[in-house]
Image (cartoon, rainbow, N blue to C red):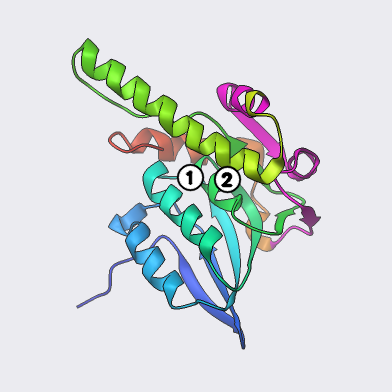
């Protein structure tokens, strides 16, 4: 039986070191946080390099991954190779340190969903989105040290940050030289990729 495809890949890169490539949508291919956490549990005590090039994904699955990475014993270094957008940017906040390629981008915005129902149902959905937003704000605030209101305003506007801006605001710790994967990471292409993904996920929080 062919194993299920995953949205991430693991590579042993040292005696006590593993690199995880998160190069797809969080929760894609039906492989959610359960699979990720199971693989992460086998790496207890190892230093992890998490390399990110992702447009985001499920808030719920991503939150479970973020929390598991924060609990990981052994150390976690995050490298944003090209794009850390939406939920992928939240996952990046688990790293200490967080490196961002000099030609990479980070994007933060409000969580959203596609819903249907009567006015009461839609009000409940709106309340849920507000609660989800508060959990994301906490992650950004914990890493950056910024004021809650500042972060909320950035999310309201959908804010794109280059490496210099991300480091200046505390979302990343240092800039590293761009990698090959980031060669096509122009703002227009990344925006197009992100919105193509977002429009296709009509039933899942992003």
169 or 57, nearer to the observer: 169
In what quadrant of the picture does the C terminus appear?
top left
Q: Residue furthest top?
A: 119
**Residue visible at 33% across and 66% down in the picture:** 5
**Residue on which disc 1 sits:** 56
Please rate how many residues cluster around mark 1, counting C-alpha atoms within 10 Å: few if below 14, some from 14 to 19, many from 20.
many
Camera-side residue of 106 and 145: 145
Q: Is residue 150 above or below residue 135?
A: above
Give the distance between the C-alpha atoms of the residues marked 2 and 1, in whole angstroms: 7 Å
Q: Is residue 63 left or right of residue 140?
A: left
- Residue 47 location in percent, x, y? 61, 74
Q: Are marks 2 and 1 in contact (CB under 8 Å)?
A: yes
Q: Secondary structure at mark 1?
A: loop
Q: Which mark is first along the chain, 1 or 2?
A: 1
Q: Is residue 49 visible?
A: yes
Q: What span is in magenta? A: 150-179
Placement of the N terminus among the 4 image quadrants: bottom left
Residue 83: give x, y in percent of width and height: 60, 48
Which residue has dot 2 on it?
Answer: 89
Q: Is residue 161 magenta?
A: yes
Picture quadrant of residue 7: bottom left
Q: Is residue 142 magenta?
A: no
């Amino acid at each position: 039986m062919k194993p299920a495809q995953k949205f991430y890949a693991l590579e042993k890169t040292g005696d006590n070191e593993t690199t995880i490539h998160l190069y797809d949508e969080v929760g894609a291919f039906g492989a959610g946080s359960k699979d990720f956490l199971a693989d992460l549990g086998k790496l207890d005590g190892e230093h992890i390099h998490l390399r990110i090039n992702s447009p985001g994904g499920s808030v719920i699955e991503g939150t479970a991954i973020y929390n598991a990475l924060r609990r990981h014993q052994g150390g976690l270094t995050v490298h944003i190779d090209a794009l850390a957008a939406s939920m992928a940017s939240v996952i990046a906040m688990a790293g200490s340190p967080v490196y961002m390629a000099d030609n990479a981008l980070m994007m933060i915005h409000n969580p959203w969903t596609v819903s249907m129902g009567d006015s009461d149902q839609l009000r409940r959905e709106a309340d849920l989105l507000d609660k989800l937003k508060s959990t994301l704000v906490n992650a950004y605030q914990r890493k950056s040290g910024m004021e809650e209101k500042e972060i909320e305003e950035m999310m309201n506007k959908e804010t794109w940050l280059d490496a210099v801006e991300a480091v200046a605001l505390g979302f990343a710790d240092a800039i590293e030289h761009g990698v090959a994967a980031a060669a096509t990471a122009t703002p227009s292409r990344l925006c197009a990729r992100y919105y193509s993904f977002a429009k296709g996920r009509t039933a899942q929080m992003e």
